[in-house]
Image (spheres, rainbow, N blue to C red):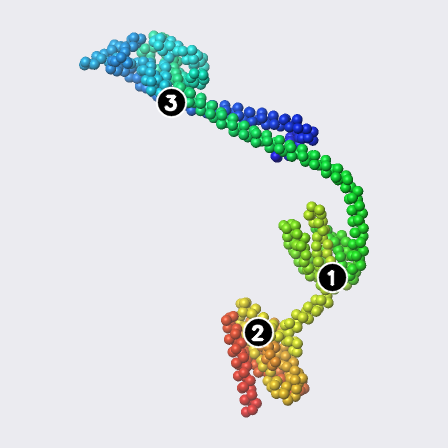
Amino acid sequence: MDFLNTSFGRMLYRDEYVLLKRYWVIPVMLWAALVASSLAWNMSYEKHQSLCIIKGQARSMFGLIEITRLWNMRHGGVYVPFAETTPTNPYRDVPGGETVTIGDRKFTYVSPYYMTRQLSELAKEQDGVLFHATSLKPINTANAPDEWESKALEGFEKTDKKETSELIEKNSENIFRFMSALLVEEPCLMCHAIQGYKVGDIRGGISITMKADKLVKSIHNQWINLTDLHAVVFFIVAGLMLFSLSQKRNQYLTLKKVNVRLHNNMVTLQQMADELMESEDRFRLIAESVSDVIWTLDDKMTNFTYISPSIAALRGFSVEEAVKETFKDALTPESYAFVRESMSQKIACYKDSGDMDCFSERIEIEQRCKDGRIIPVEVVLSAITTSDGHIKEFVGISRDITERKKEEEKLKYRGTHDAMTGLYNRAYFDAEIERIALGRQFPVSFIVADLDGLKRVNDSIGHEAGDRLIKGAAVVLNMSFRGSDVVARTGGDEFIIILNDTDEELSIKSIERVRAYQAQYNKNNDGRPVSISLGAATAYSAVNIESAIKEADKRMYDDKVSRKQQRTG
């Protein structure tokens, strides 16, 4: 329960209150008092609401009676056929007579009070509701008030209150009584002026008595439901309180046992600390003996906390100089940004999974040496965590990979260049064609070049002479094109040049430039002259690339045939 975590709960449930069960009755009693208060308020509210409903019904009935009386009064009373149910009222002095005869029918006078009494009798027969018009000074003794009505009428005269009600509960019968005051109006003075009344005085009231057995039963049912609900809530919460206290008590008892165990383990922990110190010394000895640089970094990746002496061989700095550097200063700006981004991802991975394998990756960065050189370094970076899983610091191992990078560059060069001429090879050419097809930089022109007479030279003089001829052609082609152009040897004596952003007109000028450099090369070099057949074509979209290369190849052969005919002609 959250209650135990509040300041009041902590004050109330100190150790002795939790450990000694006799104190557990205190919160239960407080809770019982709160539930009892809530029950009492809700029962009172339910009874009030029920009484308001039945009071509204009684008030409506009074309003209908009052309207009916007012109608009678404004007509100066009414005459109804004479019958046993409407005998002559001996208490009325009616101008014109208490009874009248019209034709052969006899009518008797009915005053508002008389009409109210007859309506009351009728209502009592029909619904068990009793209306009673009464006064403290009644003309008719039958209209005299009972004890309850007398108190109500006296209260009306003494106060501004003009209505009252009460639920009277008895073992035999439950009734609801309502009374509202009647004020003297002008027509009333016809009968009551002799009693000293004037307009606006309270001359009496009408009481309404209704059976309330169903109402009382409904109220009692509501009280039973409320009692049941509060009892359920009380026992649930009280049970939770006792369960929580029991759990708390068990925790205290468990803590006592843990304290004993901790005390017994102090010697063992001290021994472990001594062994850890020995392990740390051993680690330091190993770190200072290996050629790789071992270093540690604070949890913010800002300052070094340890660097092994191998840093002198790697970067030329002493340990003292290197430790003073920040991690940012020890790396090139690009490498520092790369490492920060990489470590942010690894830290996020570790926080989500708790797996230290998130750090198990080698990364390559660049570091500046003391003499200004920038060297490539391979780093394995991991984290040291506390017992609760928080990152305490980072540990890294750095290794110089300068020689390895040189070998990788050589292998990369060999994979994309022709070994004899140094030009791009067929694999690079095919990859470049795929790249161009996926891009949008058009037009792109292609020049297909073929070395003339290579087979004849190989057959008559030898392959060494043929190789010199191929290298000469490569020199001519390299001299003739821009650095952004791709000059590739795609076969023994075949070459293809890719000219980016070049249309047909510029490609023709490029061929002329090859002819000029070819003549210059042959003039400046002894030996067999270089002769190259050339053909060019232009692609204006990706779908035209293959057809443009074929067209350039065809034009190259046309050029070869044409120049051969010129030499023999």
The disc labelled 2 sits on which kind of residue?
Answer: Leu
The disc labelled 3 sits on which kind of residue?
Answer: Ser
Location of residue 111 by image quarter: top left
Above or below: residue 52 compared with residue 275: above
The quadrant of the picture occupied by the N terminus is top right
Above or below: residue 95 compared with residue 66: above
Most extreme residue toward the left, as rendered? Answer: 103
Closer to the chain start, of discs 1 and 3, is 3
Q: Position of residue 530 (x, y in %)?
A: 62, 84
Query: Which tag is nearer the camera, tag 1 or tag 2?
Result: 1
Tell me how far mark 3 sits from mark 2, CA to CA: 104 Å
| Residue beneath the point at 54% across and 26% down | 38
Near mark 3 (Cα within 10 A), the count class, few <14, some 14-19 or many ≥20, is few
The residue identified by callout 3 is: 60
Residue 499: assigned label: 2
Above or below: residue 401 compared with residue 60: below
The disc labelled 1 sits on which kind of residue?
Answer: Arg
| Residue beneath the point at 72% across and 62% down | 377
Q: Position of residue 308 (x, y in %)?
A: 78, 57
